[in-house]
Image: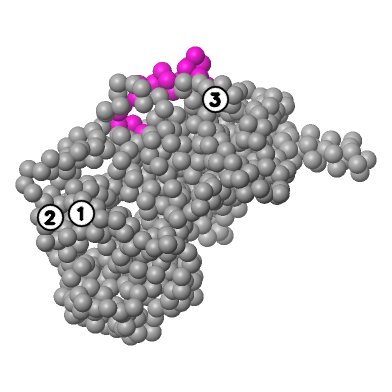
Amino acid sequence: MSWRSSSRGVVLTAYHPSGGGGDAPGGRRSGQYTMNHDHSKKIPDGASFDRSGSQDSLDELSLEDYWKELENIHETRGNDHEEGVALVVKEPDEGELEEEWLKEAGLSNLFGESSSDSQESMVFLSTLTRTQRAAVEKRVETVTQTLRKKNKQHQIPDVRDIFRLQNDSKGKVCDGSEPSTVRTSENKNETHDGTKGPKFNIETDEQKSPLEVMPSSDTDINLEIPFAEQAANLKDSSVGNMCKGGGGDTLLPNFRLPKDKTGTTKIGDLAPQDMKKVYSLALIELTALYDILGTEFKQQKAVKIKTKDSGLFGVPLSILLEQDQKKVPGTKIPLIFQKLIAQIEETTLETEGLLRIPGVATRVKTLCQELEAKFYEGTFNWENVKQHDAASLLKLFIRELPQPLLTVEYLKAFQDVQNLPTRKQQLQALNLLVILLPEANRDTLKVLLEFLQRVIDHRDKNKMTLKNVAMVMAPNLFTFRGFGSKTIEQSEFVMAAGTANVMRFMIQYQKLLWTIPKFIVNQVRKQNTERQKKEKKDKAMKKLLKKMAYDREKHEKQEKTPNDTDVPQGVIRVQAPHLSKVSMAIQLTEELKAGDIVARFLSQKSGNVQTLNKEEVFLYEIGGNIGERCLDDDTYMKDLYQLNPNAEWVIKPKQS
């Protein structure tokens, strides 16, 4: 692919040669992203470049592998002049970008014809932090001004009225002030309506939380305080230069997640309805973070184009998975992608230059054509595929996707991570970006990063360090600034080193990137609590109208205190419908963990029920202020119970 400007926006051209493309000279690969780089020019020795603290010193990072990979990609294009399919990345009109952002954030009813029915949004806004609110307010103001300019006939609310309503709402979290430090916390008292449950609030510096007393290392990733709030506090402090420095695999900070007694939440642990809320909150938080740090956050939008509706290479992930699931129900990763990785690993990961040394171009092109014809028939002969050829096919698959694996919408945001001031902030932004990826893209990226780490684990033999692998893979995942304007060599050099560093981060910290921050989970809990209050009020009105208030109130009281009547104080009832022991009352202690409860149930064996291993079943937190959450084994149950006393507890297999 190549970028060029047009009156319609930015055009990304995908070349699809006959025969499914390939790696041979003279055949232009489809899905190829290019940049305006003159390979005849050499980077001058000792050149001085403006260094950002967000990346390693550029002259210390050897970009030789990067340029070689880019050269290999360009060489495969040869002199082919096949007609390309243009992927138009639309440049939005004034206000259009912000309007689309509000829709993505689930706040479209703050403007337009549905603006009068925005009670759900008021509940949502009541859970936002100061910086998140500022990000929303900024976009609403822009949309409002744009709609007024266009003389729209529907109601156009004033942004100040929206947030005034939200501040006056009964279930508010923020008091309208601007605290210097904002953090979510759990108050284990009763809520203001007298119901049993935790109270989430926002604390200022004057209200010291236990978190503030705890010593925090520069390498600890704090998931309790919103990232944008951390950035706002760090902006004026003297510690803004932490975690900056030189290159080399060993010099990346050893970032870690401190243990959370209420359990770590991973992507995939929450129910779909809660993940939808997580997505909205992650988008707002990422925008707030970029706003605080002065980095422009713009979602690109690709105009729909005609793509292949069958085959392997150059096929959208959604279509690939649709056809793959007919053969392997439930599969979440394209079968060809899985098979290519398996083929590479089948030989050995100790092969020197693995991923860096390209396969034979003519052979790769032939293999590509044969795979297209025979893969799904099961007649393809994998014995003919050499390891370097398989690696070339894997990279070809990534490049030929009609839209980037990191998506058109967020590719620039991934690139801009390199511009953030500190490595910790870069990691925080990547965490939120991974959450924002579509499920198919996120799952495929996860498998790719895990594979790349396995390659790096054999670096003593294959000579492929973290830096080498990142340099080779970055051109295959990232699009560069072509946009029709000529860029100077220095900026191209900075872009190359920057995207290679982002690639390093994604590989090095991949286990952290699939974690949902606790402050977002707490905001989801708060939203669910507020929604439940509203539902209770609506139910009460219906009961009154039906003249059944007495019976319903009696029933409601019984529902409110099941733990008080069914089990003693400090005891929970755990259900396990798939195990021999289907129910058990568990006494909560300070040290009792979720894994202990699962182990206790599994020790109750019976020949009448299918035997399940500990790795196959998990304890779930269901209901109360969360939809459904799979608990990690190290979750302290007493702490979690105090956070969500109205939950039910069920042991069951985890759904794939």
Foreground of the two, 89 or 379: 89
**Which residue does the image show at 39% across and 70% down from the upper left?**
86
Q: Which circle marks residue 471 in the picture?
A: 1
Taking the magenta stretch, the answer to whether it contains residue 212 is yes
* Of marks 3 and 2, the one in the foreground: 2
**Which residue does the image show at 25% across and 49% down from the upper left?**
495
Foreground of the two, 441 or 147: 147
Q: Circle 1 sits in a helix, a strand or a loop, which is it?
A: helix
Mark 1 residue crowding within 10 angstroms, few (<14) / some (14–19) / many (20+): many
Which amino acid type corresponds to the residue marked 1 in the rendered image?
Met
2 and 1 marks in contact (CB < 8 Å)? yes
Which amino acid type corresponds to the residue marked 3 in the rendered image?
Ile
Q: Main secondary structure of the magenta part?
A: loop
**Which of pointers 2 and 1 lies earlier in the amino acid sequence?**
2
Q: Which circle marks residue 462 in the picture?
A: none
Q: CA distance from mark 3 to mark 2?
A: 49 Å
The residue stretch that appears in magenta = 202-222
Q: Which circle marks residue 64 in the picture?
A: 2
Which amino acid type corresponds to the residue marked 2 in the rendered image?
Glu
Is residue 18 in sight in this rendering? yes
* Residue under pointer 3: 202
Q: Circle 3 sits in a helix, a strand or a loop, which is it?
A: strand
**Which residue does the image show at 45% across and 55% down from the upper left?**
91
